[in-house]
Image: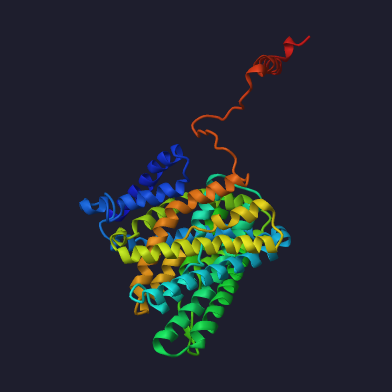
Amino acid sequence: METMICLSVAILGGLLLSRLAKLLHLPAVTAYLVAGLLLGPFCLGRIGLEGLGFQSLGQVEELSIFCQIALGFIAFAIGNEFRFSQLKTMGSRAIIIGIAQAVVTTVLVDLLLLGLHFLAPELISAPAAITLGAIASATAPAATLMVVKQYKADGPLTRLLMLVVAIDDAVGLVLFSVSFGIAGALENGAVDLMDVVVEPILEIIGSLGLGALIGLLLHLVERFFHSRSKRMAVSVAFVLLMVGLSYVKFTVGGIHMGFSLLLVCMMAGTIFCNICPTSEELMSRIDRWSTPLSIVFFVLSGAELDLRILTQPLTLLVGFVYILARSAGKYLGAYGSCRLTGCNAAITRHLGVTLLPQAGVALGMALTAASLSDGAVVRNVVLFAVLVYELVGPALTKRSLTYAGEIRPEGKTNARTHNKPRIPAFLHGNFAKTHHAAEHPEHKA
């Protein structure tokens, strides 16, 4: 009962705050995150009233399955962007930019944090600095997709952005595995090539292969159903299946294997959308169905942000260096690679800013890095950065897409009334005559 009440309060709180965000011209995703902070264990949750907010981080973590399900639908929707028609025109460009911006960001964060380590070793260790450099490469696809959908953004920058964000996940996984392996070697004095190279590559290959198989099976199964509601139900079932399979871990010949939820779902969405002729209509229906899940995801993401890190001056200092270095790396990496691949001026100037949001993937990497002796520093720095990026990043993404001319000015819409065409005042007379003649043809001469 308490769980259902919490979920209800989360959705309603996010929706109500989104009305205020609209007045301030902020993206709805920012409102959902702020609602999570207010309902979290460090604000309303401290009151201790059951159902009014989350009373502990443990209570938020108990609902993490809803976040995973929402991520599954978000990644599946991103796969819709990988249509062969787009890949032919910008596929190679997206791959170059996706790799370049991630590598440049990792290198720049590594250099600055290692410099900080040599200046003040008590602030951060070398293994923690190297690990944070790899975590910096990760970009949050969920916040970016929500902004694109809310404002119906479309154009060369938006399409390239969605491809780069998707590629970023695979690149980030490899960079993190290599960096974390090096960090472990610095602490333990030995490098395990199996952990550093073999296992991450196998995870990527296995995830892409599983996603391709599920995308093909989804197309084969949905052909047996003709009603829109049943085809949507089949698609929902397959996304839930992928979320469940992403939890599977196993060992083969001493090699630890697993699957990346984002990669599996993105690949399934890519295959399905390229072989199913009616995929566009089905994807739009799934998107409408999964909207409440997305709200829950962002509210819970805001609720799990530990505000106690704001009372730690040393963490804030390292966090500011991390944020500045990562922001510069994302912008310079995207700017340079866009110039190299011949992108137009609007994409070159604005793509880097749209890659700033950071959330779930980075937090997952920080959780893995907890085994380091300085793992707590890594976690706290990432938590602080996520707090800043998730509150500021969506607004910056909206701003960049607007300046690039890919977001139209918002208009007022109301689902309670029919949207009628607005007729300029000087045409009212002519419109009235035409309308009258259409309804009363017997009055014509």
Q: Residue at x 53, y 74 (%)?
A: 175
Q: Residue at x 64, y 59 (%)?
A: 273
Q: Residue at x 56, y 79 (%)?
A: 201
Q: Is residue 22 left or right of residue 307?
A: right
Q: Nearer the viewer, residue 316 or 362?
A: 316
Q: Residue at x 65, y 49 (%)?
A: 155
**Measured from the top left, where is residue 30 in percent x and y?**
43, 49
**Measured from the top left, where is residue 103 in percent x and y?**
57, 71
Quadrant where the image shows the N terminus: bottom left
| Vertical position of residue 442 compared to residue 65: above or below | above
Q: Is residue 47 left or right of residue 202?
A: left
**Measured from the top left, where is residue 428 in percent x and y?**
65, 17
| Vertical position of residue 65 compared to residue 421: above or below | below
**Measured from the top left, where is residue 300 in percent x and y?**
37, 56
Task: Determine if residue 258 is in view.
Answer: no
Q: Nearer the viewer, residue 133 or 177?
A: 133
